[in-house]
Amino acid sequence: MPENEETKEPQENLQVGPQTNSGGPPDSPVASTSEDLEAIKTELASVKEAYAQAISKYLEAARALNAAIPQDVIAGQTIEEIDASVKKAKAIANAVKANLEAQAKEAKVPAGAPTRGEISLEGLSPREKIAAGIQQKGGIS
């Protein structure tokens, strides 16, 4: 069956395959992809900067909340690393504290003067023994 010119579809605007348009408008797929890539790179850089600032502030907060722990002990490049260093530092601090408390209990000295005990009479001469006996009974001093 022969085709009429009326039933033929115009095919002059149809293209098959990728469109390459050198020097064409910036709406081409290659131009928009490179613009998207640059936008993504810029956004990634800003996200990385914000993340670094957030980690820095988190590290400062962790150090401020744990003032009893030396600041150089709490460190890390991620939140997990900082949390792990805080946990480890607290464990060390608690162990040191327990050790110091145990040492303090061993060396505990009662407050005030010790109670007076009886004078040892060993090694005293008979005269000194008599003087000590008189002094204990409230005699002549």
Image: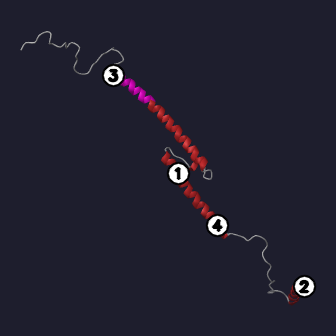
Give the CA distance from mark 2 to mark 4: 43 Å
Q: Work out whether mark 1 precedes mark 4 in sequence or the reverse, and give the earlier one.
A: 1
Query: Which residue sits at x=62%, y=67%?
Result: 102
- Taking the image as shown, residue 79 lies to the left or right of residue 112, namely left
Query: Which residue sits at x=23%, y=21%?
Result: 17
Give the CA distance from mark 1 to mark 2: 69 Å
Identify the mark at residue 103; answer none if there is no mark: 4
Give the CA distance from mark 3 to mark 1: 48 Å
Q: Which residue is mark 2?
A: 138
In percent of width and height, residue 63 lies at: 59, 47
Q: Which residue is mark 3?
A: 30
Q: Work out whether mark 2 precedes mark 4 in sequence or the reverse, and give the earlier one.
A: 4
Quadrant in which residue 110 is drawn: bottom right
Magenta range is 29-42
Q: Secondary structure at mark 2?
A: loop
Give the CA distance from mark 1 to mark 4: 27 Å
